[in-house]
Image (cartoon, helix red, strand yellow):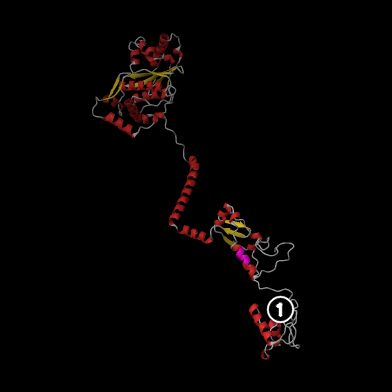
């Protein structure tokens, strides 16, 4: 049973081997006789003619030598020849086609065996409809296919354009990807181009990995990346803050012009002017009014001091000059000095005493053309203000102590009727205008700021502003008035 099994295995192996085409060798020696004798191949022309029945030993040795030198393969026991022993069992006929030695049978889609035939492949197309079904590749065909994919022969130089030459000069790395059709993904990358199932990488993978590792180890690059990220987060934070800040922060109110704070330089100049040692030093000279301001005169602007006539009259002249500089910003006003009312009532009521104070040649305009006329009123130790409001046709009285003097308003109404009749030849009924004291008037809270209150009444009314100041602003107004007198310019 063991001998029979062994014979069957050897019989199967003999069927798989190709049948060489040369004369049969000489029979083995009697001591090692073969168990089986194959039939001669009916397809091999070299073995179709039967050998001589009694070959000579020289012919047998020559044929054996030729077979061993030309055909590498199995042992001589499988060579086709007519068996000299008629009693031996005959083998079945060999397969109709020779089965060559082949390589691995795994189909790689990277080489696209199911596509059209390559131009360098010899023989019939593997995927042509008229061609027979593809056979398994042999070792030589497999090697040839691998070499053709990895190292393709370059075309002739004349047929390659310049752009193609530059493109082919870039080293490429072919990476075979074996994947299913459902799992294919289109990759749009600058360094990788997907062509079917073959990825052509213009930069070798090891270089990419090396550069990535270098970037991770570079401390300076990490610092720059951190700074960039920090700057980007800061920019986004500022943008969000700019959107939220107007809602959570109150709007910054602009400081009105009468309350603009003094600079440090102005503070130092005013302090030196008010507290210097030489009291007779001339600090300002106003040539149009011929008023000279010395340190002694200016010191009335110190805290807890009464204002004198020189400081008040010079400041009123500066207000008139301010109006002439910017007529569109301020009302058209006339500012009488501190001596006008005293001169008007010197003899009870004397219009002729002040008739020449308001000539058009001297002023350049008539009083009836003004919007408001300001008349300082001095009562022994107290300053008040009377206003001829031509724009609103009324006479107003302003006292920082809250008192009212109707006599002053009646006298001014009579004066204005005489003034218009004398200068303009018109008869107006000013006596019928309203005479009133101003309500909600800012009042002084001490015994020395009456003159400062009077000047600020005039200043705010000439700006056409409401009286929005109070006792707390008096110290600032004293310094500001001193600064404007030293500069000979009201702001």
Towards the viewer: 421 or 90: 90
Q: Which quarter of the figure has residue 33?
A: bottom right
Q: Is residue 52 left or right of residue 219?
A: right
Q: Position of residue 327 (x, y in %)?
A: 43, 21
- Does the magenta portion include 146? yes
Q: Quadrant of the C terminus?
A: top left
Q: Is residue 60 left or right of residue 275?
A: right
Towards the viewer: 97 or 404: 97
Q: Quadrant of the N terminus?
A: bottom right
| Residue 349 visible here | no
Q: Which quarter of the figure has residue 178?
A: bottom right
Q: Which residue is mark 1?
A: 15
The residue at 23%/27% (across/down) is 278
Q: Main secondary structure of the magenta part?
A: helix
Q: Which quarter of the figure has residue 435?
A: top left
Which residue ends up furthest to the bottom in the rendered image?
31
Q: Position of residue 416 (x, y in %)?
A: 41, 13
Residue 116 position (above or below residue 433): below
Q: Secondary structure at mark 1?
A: helix
Residue 160 position (above or below residue 274): below
| Residue 32 visible here | yes
Q: Position of residue 54 (x, y in %)?
A: 73, 87
- Does the magenta portion include 337? no
Dot 1: few (<14), some (14–19), or many (≥20) neighbours within 10 Å? some
Towards the viewer: 258 or 1: 1
Residue segment shown in magenta: 144-148
């Amino acid at each position: 049973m063991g001998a029979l099994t062994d014979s069957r295995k050897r019989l199967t192996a003999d069927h798989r081997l190709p049948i060489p085409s040369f004369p049969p060798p000489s029979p083995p020696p009697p001591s090692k006789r073969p168990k089986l004798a194959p039939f001669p191949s009916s397809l091999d022309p070299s073995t179709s003619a039967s050998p001589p029945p009694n070959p000579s030993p020289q012919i047998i040795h020559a044929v054996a030598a030729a077979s061993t030198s030309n055909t590498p393969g199995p042992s001589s026991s499988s060579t086709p020849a007519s068996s000299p022993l008629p009693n031996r069992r005959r083998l079945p006929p060999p397969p109709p086609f020779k089965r060559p030695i082949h390589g691995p049978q795994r189909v790689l889609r990277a080489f696209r065996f199911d596509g059209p035939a390559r131009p360098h492949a010899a023989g019939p197309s593997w995927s042509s409809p008229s061609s027979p079904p593809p056979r398994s590749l042999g070792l030589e065909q497999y090697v040839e296919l691998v070499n053709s994919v990895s190292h393709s022969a370059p075309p002739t130089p004349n047929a390659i354009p310049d752009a193609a030459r530059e493109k082919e000069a870039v080293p490429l790395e072919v990476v075979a990807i074996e994947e299913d059709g459902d799992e294919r993904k289109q990759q749009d990358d600058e360094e990788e181009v997907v062509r079917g199932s073959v990825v052509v990488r213009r930069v070798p993978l090891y270089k990419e990995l090396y550069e990535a590792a270098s970037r991770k180890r570079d401390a300076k690059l990490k610092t720059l990346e951190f700074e960039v990220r920090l700057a980007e987060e800061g920019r986004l934070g500022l943008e969000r803050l700019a959107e939220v800040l107007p809602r959570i922060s109150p709007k910054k109110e602009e400081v009105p012009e009468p309350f603009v704070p003094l600079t440090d330089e102005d503070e130092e100049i005013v302090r030196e002017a008010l507290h210097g040692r030489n009291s007779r030093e001339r600090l300002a000279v106003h040539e149009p009014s011929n008023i000279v301001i010395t340190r002694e005169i200016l010191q009335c602007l110190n805290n807890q001091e009464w204002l004198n006539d020189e400081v008040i009259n010079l400041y009123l002249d500066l207000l008139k000059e301010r109006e002439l500089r910017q007529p569109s910003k301020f009302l058209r006003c006339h500012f009488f000095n501190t001596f006008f009312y005293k001169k008007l009532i010197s003899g009870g009521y004397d219009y002729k005493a002040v008739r020449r104070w308001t000539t058009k040649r001297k002023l350049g305009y008539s009083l009836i053309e003004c919007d408001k006329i300001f008349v300082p009123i001095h009562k022994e130790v107290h300053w008040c203000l009377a206003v001829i409001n031509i724009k609103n046709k009324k006479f107003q009285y302003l006292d920082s102590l809250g008192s009212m003097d109707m006599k002053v308003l009646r006298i001014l109404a009579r004066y204005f009727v005489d003034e218009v009749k004398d200068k303009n030849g018109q008869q107006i009924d000013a006596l019928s205008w309203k005479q009133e004291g101003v309500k909600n008037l800012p009042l002084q809270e001490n015994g020395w700021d009456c003159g400062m209150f009077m000047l600020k009444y005039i200043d705010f009314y000439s700006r056409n502003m409401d009286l929005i100041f109070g006792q707390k602003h008096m110290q600032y107004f004293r310094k500001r008035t001193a600064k404007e007198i030293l500069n000979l310019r009201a702001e």
